Amino acid sequence: MALADIVRSGIALAKSTLATGELLSTVTLEKWASQNDNGEATYAAPVSYQTLVTNADDRLSSLTGVTHLARCSVTFFEDVAITPLDRVTLADGSTGPIVRVDEGVVDATGRMMVKVMIGWRV
């Protein structure tokens, strides 16, 4: 069994364990649409997803060299295209900057998972 098969099996097991919804959290993703005349971001209609949200205390460097403190990671069990300009709202209503997007883990069914690190709003 190749390493990729082991990883896919583990992800499938985790997803089936989480299927009860007890550990899952509903988050809202709003895709960045544009900026208005005042320079404020505008977003597309919100879409809700069942995700795994875990606390994090990681220092991450952005592409511009700025260091961010991540407060949580949000794992989407679907192939969702997310950019740092988008907005993720957690179940408690809080939001923060998207400081990192990790894509590329495929589960046993061949679906892509996306992990997003959310930073503190300053």
Image (spheres, helix red, strand yellow):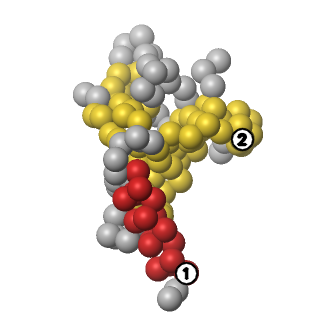
Residue 15, compared with residue 1, is above or below; it is above
The residue that appears at 60% across and 21% down in the rendered structure is 121
- Residue closer to the observer: 3 or 120: 3
Residue drawn at point x = 54 percent, y = 26 percent: 96
Answer few, some or many: residues within 10 Å of disc 1's Cα (few below 14, many 20 plus, some between 14 and 19).
Answer: few
In this view of the protein, which residue sits in the foreground, 91 or 78?
A: 91
Question: Residue 36 in the image: x percent, y percent?
Answer: 36, 17
As displayed, is residue 3 above or below residue 11?
below
- Toward the top, the furthest residue is 38
**Residue 97 location (% of width, % of height):** 55, 29
In the picture as drawn, the residue positioned furthest to the bottom comes out as 1
Task: Give the camera-side residue of 19 and 87.
Answer: 19
Q: Amino acid at mark 2?
A: Asp
**x, y percentage for residue 13?**
43, 64
**SS under mark 2:** strand
For residue 41, side relative to residue 71 (left or right): left
Mark 2 to mark 1: distance in Å?
A: 27 Å
Q: Position of residue 70 (x, y in %)?
A: 65, 35
Determine the residue positioned at 45% across, 59% down. Answer: 14
Task: Count the marks.
Answer: 2
Which residue has dot 2 on it?
A: 58
Element at badge 1? helix
Q: Residues within 10 Å of mark 2 (few under 14, many from 20)?
A: some
Who's the residue at 42% across and 11% down the image?
Answer: 38
Using the image as rendered, state which of residue 122 and residue 48 is in the foreground: 48
> Which residue in the structure is indicated by mark 1?
3
Q: Is residue 26 visible?
A: yes
Q: Quadrant of the C terminus?
A: top right
